[in-house]
Every structure is written in structure tokens, then in C-alpha cells.
Image (cartoon, helix red, strand yellow):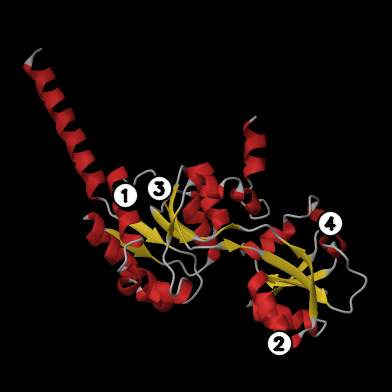
């Protein structure tokens, strides 16, 4: 091998080493859905980024997006490394981006559709096709769970957007909507006081919100993240997060099996229909 080839080989090796070091030093990006203003969200998630940075020895940057369109676009581009959000998005990322779910909130999520207790015209969720239902705007999981009960998009309920489950229940009670979509425990709480509604549909319980990581997160770092988030002192170190989502309860370890097929709930959200993408590739 002559000197020219040796120099070229040496340059290639140096370039490869530089690229590997650059990748190793690139920070992990942590994010969550735009549920609140940037300042309020930073109070919840910046401590998580700092806590996991200390646990892994890797730089972790928190990114806030102030609208769902940007959040979903960046997700589809695979720009996130550590994400905390709903089970439908976790399930989608498992299929499309090879994400791995690590820990989740305890318990199951279930949703109900309720109508006025004296409404005898609506006996099942299928009777709501073409009728108004009050629910949080998609991609809210409760609303998408109900819409998923309808195979024909032209024969779905008309969703009237509200800002909270409490508002959804009140809108059903005062006749703004024929039906209300809300968490099962929220309906129970509101109806015990008001006694104005009855349940015509309840979904099966599915895995709760959770943290998933991209394939760029090293196996050793995944182990450290799980250990940190399930550590006994995690609630104290991440007080704002636990106060909001998980008061007085520990996070639970999870696996892909718990989120299997949940990505299909996003079929009515543009760019997230797994079935449509599969059909296009055939």
C-alpha cells in the first residue's frame, strides 16, 4: 500500500472516529405533548431532563412545542429520544420508529360515553352516528377511542370540542351535545354529585401514559433511565411531575406487549394511519 492510500485510509479512520464521537456527544431530546404553556411545562419536564442527565451521564435537553401540529410533525421525523405521552402515540412509535417503552403510570385507562339518564333514543354508541358528542379535540385518547368504534368515517359522531371532561359532562347535561366522552373515573365523580347521566359505552382498559425511548438511546442508558424513574426518591426529586400525574404512586416498568396495536387508535389523525401506510407499501 503506497503513501497516498495510507493517508486516505488514515483520513477515513479519523473521519469515522470524529463522526462516532459527535454522535456519542449529541444530547438526547426529551419532550412531551403541548398540554400547557411553555413555562408551566418546563417546570414539570426540565427537572426530569436534569435528573436523567445525572443518572445516565449524558446531556439531555428538554424541548417544548406549543402546538400539536409541530409536536406530531417532529415525532414523525423521529427527532425525539425520550418521550412521555399517551399510549396511542407510544404504540405508534413502537411500530414506526422502533421505540422501546420503559416505564408508565400505574393503572389502566378506560373511557365512557354518557347520555342524559332520561334519553331513551340512544341505546348504544353506534346510535351516535351523525349526532353531536362533546369531547376533547383529537388526538385526545378518549375521543379517538370512541371514534375508533366506527368503521365508516362518514358515519361517525360529530365531535363538539370542549376543554375538559368536566365541561364535556356539563355540555351533555345541559343539552349542548347528545353525549359526553370522558374518563370512566371522571364520569363516576361527576355523576355521583349530579346524577344526570348514564353510560351507554365503556372501553376496555389499556396501558397508561408512559415514557418511551428511541433506538439512539443506548441499552446501558435505558437501564439507568428505568432505575432512576422507578427509584424510591424519584417522587421527591420530580415533585412537579408526580404532583400532576402520579401523586402518591410509583411509576411501573413496562414493555412493548402492553402497547401492542394501540397505534391503530391514531387512524383518523393525519399522517398516523398505520393501516393506510401499510396498504400503500404493498
Please report whichever mark, 3 or 1, sits nearer to the chain's N-terminal start.
3
Question: Does the rendering let one see residue 183?
Answer: no
- Which dot, 1 or 4, sits closer to the camera? 1
Upstream in sequence: badge 2 or badge 4:
4
Question: Disc 2 marks which residue?
Answer: 193
Question: Image check: 244 left or right of 42?
Answer: right
* Mark sitting on residue 60: none
Q: Mark 4 points at which residue?
A: 155
Camera-nearest label, 2 or 4: 2
Which of the two marks, 2 or 1, is nearer to us in this view?
Answer: 2
Q: Closer to the N terminus: mark 3 or mark 4?
A: 4
In the displayed structure image, the side of residue 239 where residue 184 appears, left or right: right
Quadrant containing the C terminus in the rendered view: top right
Label 2's element?
Answer: helix
- Front residue of 113 and 1: 113
Q: What label sits on residue 214 in the rendered view?
A: 3
Tag in front: 3 or 2? 2
Distance from the alpha carbon under mark 2 to that under mark 1: 45 Å
Q: Which of marks 3 and 1 is in front?
A: 1
Q: Residues within 10 Å of mark 4 (few under 14, many from 20)?
A: some
**Counting other residues with Cα less than 10 Å from the Cα at mark 3, is it few (<14), some (14-19), or many (20 or more)?**
many
CA distance separating discs 3 and 4: 37 Å
Mark 2 and 1 residues: CB-CB less than 8 Å, in contact?
A: no
| Cα separation between marks 3 and 1 | 13 Å
Position in image of residue 194 (x %, y %): 74, 87
- Badge 1 or badge 4: first in the primary sequence: 4
Above or below, comparing residue 13 to residue 57 in the picture: above
Amino acid at each position: 500500500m503506497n503513501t497516498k492510500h495510507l493517508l486516505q485510509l488514515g483520513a477515513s479512520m479519523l473521519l469515522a472516529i470524529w463522526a462516532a464521537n459527535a454522535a456519542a456527544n449529541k444530547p438526547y431530546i426529551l419532550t412531551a405533548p403541548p398540554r400547557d404553556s411553555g413555562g408551566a411545562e418546563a417546570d414539570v419536564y426540565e427537572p426530569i431532563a436534569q435528573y436523567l442527565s445525572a443518572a445516565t451521564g449524558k446531556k439531555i435537553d428538554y424541548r417544548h412545542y406549543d402546538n400539536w401540529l409541530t409536536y406530531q410533525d417532529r415525532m414523525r421525523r423521529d427527532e425525539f429520544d425520550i418521550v412521555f405521552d399517551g399510549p396511542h402515540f407510544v404504540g405508534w412509535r413502537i411500530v414506526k420508529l422502533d421505540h422501546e417503552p420503559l416505564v408508565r403510570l400505574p393503572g389502566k385507562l378506560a373511557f365512557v360515553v354518557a347520555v342524559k339518564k332520561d334519553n331513551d333514543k340512544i341505546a348504544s354508541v353506534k346510535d351516535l352516528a351523525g349526532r353531536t358528542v362533546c369531547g376533547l379535540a383529537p388526538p385526545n385518547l378518549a375521543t379517538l377511542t370512541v371514534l375508533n368504534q366506527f368503521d365508516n368515517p362518514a358515519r361517525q359522531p360529530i365531535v363538539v370540542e370542549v376543554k375538559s371532561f368536566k365541561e364535556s359532562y356539563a355540555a351533555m347535561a345541559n343539552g349542548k351535545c347528545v353525549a359526553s366522552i370522558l374518563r370512566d373515573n371522571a364520569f363516576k365523580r361527576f355523576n355521583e354529585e349530579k346524577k344526570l347521566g348514564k353510560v351507554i359505552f365503556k372501553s376496555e382498559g389499556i396501558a397508561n401514559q408512559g415514557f418511551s425511548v428511541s433506538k439512539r438511546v443506548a441499552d446501558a442508558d435505558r437501564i439507568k433511565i428505568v432505575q432512576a424513574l422507578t427509584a424510591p426518591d424519584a417522587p421527591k426529586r420530580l415533585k412537579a411531575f408526580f404532583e400532576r400525574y402520579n401523586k402518591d404512586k410509583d411509576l411501573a416498568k413496562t414493555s412493548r406487549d402492553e402497547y401492542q396495536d394501540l397505534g391503530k387508535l391514531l387512524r383518523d389523525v393525519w399522517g398516523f394511519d398505520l393501516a393506510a401506510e401499510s396498504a400503500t407499501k404493498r
